[in-house]
Amino acid sequence: MSAIVLAQEAANVNLNQGLAAIGYGLAAIGPGIGVGLIFSSVINGTARQPEARGVLLSLAWTTFAIVEVLALLGFVVYFLATAA
């Protein structure tokens, strides 16, 4: 194959799916770190003040849900990018 034919075939390749997968992988790092920080803070807070465990856990589950919504939003954007 000549270089011109290879260049024309490379121009027709859809990079959108691969870039969307890399983008979602990078976007999933943030919520992963966030969830770890949330629950490590609950463990530290409970160790310092055990009677506040209930308040800390309810707050942790609320913030966990918000962080996971961000991860799911990235997942939806990934599928929108691959569908186009």
Image (cartoon, rainbow, N blue to C red):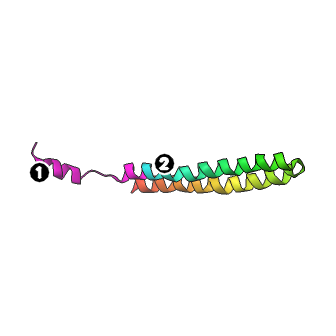
User: Helix, strand, or loop for circle 2?
Assistant: helix
Contact between labelled residues 1 and 2, with CB atoms less than 8 Å apart: no
Q: Which residue is mark 1?
A: 4
Q: Residue at x 51, y 53 (%)?
A: 27
Q: Amino acid at mark 2?
A: Gly
Q: Secondary structure at mark 1?
A: helix
Give residue 25's mark. Answer: 2
Quadrant housing the N terminus: top left
Q: CA distance from mark 2 to mark 1?
A: 34 Å
Depth check: 69 or 25 in front? 25
Q: Position of residue 30 (x, y in %)?
A: 57, 53
Q: Earlier in the sequence, mark 2 or mark 1?
A: 1
- The one nearer the camera, 43 or 73, is 43
Which quadrant: the C terminus?
Answer: bottom left
How far across and how far down the image is residue 74, in percent? 53, 55
Overall secondary structure of the magenta section: helix
Residue drawn at 67 percent across, 57 percent down: 66
Residue at the image position 77 percent from the left and 46 percent from the top: 43
Q: Residue at x 70, y 51 (%)?
A: 38
Q: Give the extent of the magenta segment.
A: 1-20
Question: How many numbered circles are shown?
Answer: 2
Residue 63 appears in which quarter of the rendering?
Answer: bottom right
Q: Nearer the viewer, residue 84 or 35?
A: 35
